[in-house]
Amino acid sequence: MLLDIEKCQVCAICYSSCPAKSITITYYDMNSLTRYLEKAKDEYGSDALVVTCKGTNPDASEVEQLFGISEFIPLSVPCVGRIPAEVLLEAVSRIGIKAVYILACDEDYCRFERGSTTARLRAAALGALLEQLGHGAGVIKFKQRSLKVRADRNKCISCGNCVFYCPYDAAKLEHGAATFDLELCRGCGLCVSLCPALALDLEHWEGDKISTMISDFSREKGRPNILVMRCQWAVFPEFDEELDSNVHVIDMPCAGRVEPLHIVQAFQQGIDGVLIVACQEDDCKSKKGSKEARRSTAALKKTLGQIGLGERLHFCTVAPRYPGSFREELRQFKERIGSACSQEVTQ
Amino acid sequence: MIVTAQKPLDEILESISPYHSVLIAGCDGCTQPPRGLREAKTLAQLLELGGKLRGKDFNFEVITLPKQCDSYLTAGPVQSQIKDMEAVLSLACGLGVQTIAQILPDVPVLPAQNTLFIGADIREDSIFEERCAACGDCMLALTGGICPIARCPKSLLNGPCGGSQHGKCEVDPEKDCAWDLIIKRLEKLGRLSVLEEIRPPKNFAVVVRPGRVST
């Protein structure tokens, strides 16, 4: 059997399902997952494991709301369909995890099409197996959710941008304001970034929240101070991803959620360089997100060029199937920004 | 819709340079692309940044107005917001700028946009295209709903000219020949015979400039 690496989205569903274990993977392989769990069990002092897909991104209070627990070991991965059953089996039988809570995306929302369904079926089978092995019923708890757009009808100016740009036909103009069919919304955030009236927001990636993160980063002293806004499907960070202290990363639901307002805010508050990292257009999990991000970044770059800051903003595309591509883009960008900053100091 | 393009930041910075406190006024009306709250806030930050790089400190406040050219709707919000602000920077078309200037006779009102034309948003191609010249004597009924005044650079009434090549215009081969579009459209509608009548020169003085009509 051959795998076409150029088409691979690195969802790892094949890896986690292969009975012959004949597929190897760079990110979140069985060994690194197990090592993480062993370490995290001591670190977090908990025997509850919460596995979440990045697409669901719950914070601690949401986990408490969803599962009723406040202390837990977090494990956030790009698609829960990638976690092999063996890892969870070992977590319970050997590492001493007493309860596993799995939060997947809604099935029609899964960025890897079959990941959420695979995870659901696997959780049910594993739960039954653990019960037979004497670990009791209900060790594995499985839930699904997805993050959607929120519209403020009072702020809407009926321009229709969201209706045009929504890749999923979820937006309509009705009775003088935009309304959204949340069954269709896939939470890419493109409409939010393009709404001229700031009438839309995206759960978890609210504009104010991103703005506060940028303000916090801008207060850091390291130079050059670099902000990376990257699509969470374009880069799968390794466990304990270590970046220099002057590099601040915001993982976005899609590059289409990156908005010029936030980029300009970053520069205005003293960030030296902003790197936008998107998927390649063919890989975009939100159809138009990468394309629109490229377009809007190019337009902003031109405007920033009018005040001599065009080179401080860079757009690039990477893919998880090329490990190291993000780090290489970041290295080159840091070098460019570093030399631009030192030139300024010299001047 | 009225299509505008933002002025270069240098030019805007130059025009607001005599002032410290500036009210930036967006417009949610027909200006395209919409110059609402998002654009107003983004511009405020860009100008603060540009000012800082030039050693100039600004204090901006930002509002947006439903229709900046409507003096009745605009007067209240602008008057209550102006307080100690020394100038207004408008993101509306030239009409919005003049409306605020009329409301605030003692305050300088500056344009942040160049007003380009009455145009359509061709979303699929990410462009705006001029479609109406506001000539005052609409002939769209005779031209299949395609305006030769606005869309033919020569505003020909009996086109196409000899420069029409493969459906494209000789003045700008990127653009469609308006008369080629008109003929194809009338053909489709079975109304090509309309063109057999020669159109006499158009009266461009239907609207005596500056135009004025009673409501």
Image: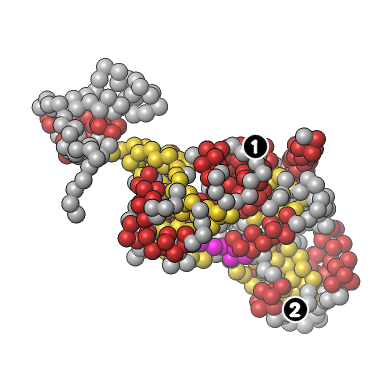
Decide: is B29 above or below B156: below
Image quadrant for the C terminus of chain A? top right
The residue indicated by pointer 1 is: A308
Q: Is residue B49 left or right of residue B16?
A: right
Query: What residue is rendered at 74% in x and 71% in y?
Result: A50
Range of the magenta residues?
Answer: A200-206
Residue A204 within the magenta-colored segment of the rendering? yes
Q: Which label's residue is closer to the chain start, 1 or 2?
A: 2
The circle drawn on residue A70 is 2
Alpha carbon separation for disc pair 1 and 2: 48 Å
Q: Is residue B27 left or right of residue A315?
A: left
List x then y, in percent, for residue A65.
66, 78
List x then y, in percent, for residue A242.
83, 53
Nearer mark to the viewer, of 1 and 2: 1
Q: Mark 2 belongs to which amino acid?
A: Ser
10 Å neighbourhood of mark 2: few (<14), some, or many (≥20)? Answer: few
List x then y, in percent, for residue B109.
44, 48
10 Å neighbourhood of mark 1: few (<14), some, or many (≥20)? Answer: few
Subunit ID for the residue under disc 2:
A
- Does residue A246 show up? yes
Q: Is residue B91 left or right of residue B119?
A: right
Badges 1 and 2, same chain: yes
| The image quarter in which residue B159 lies | top left
Subunit ID for the residue under disc 1:
A
Q: Are marks 1 and 2 in contact (CB under 8 Å)?
A: no
Q: Mark 1 belongs to which amino acid?
A: Gly
Image quadrant for the N terminus of chain A? top right
The circle drawn on residue A181 is none
Decide: is A48 above or below B21: below
| The image quarter in which residue B169 lies | top left
Query: What residue is rendered at 62% in x and 70% in y?
Result: A144
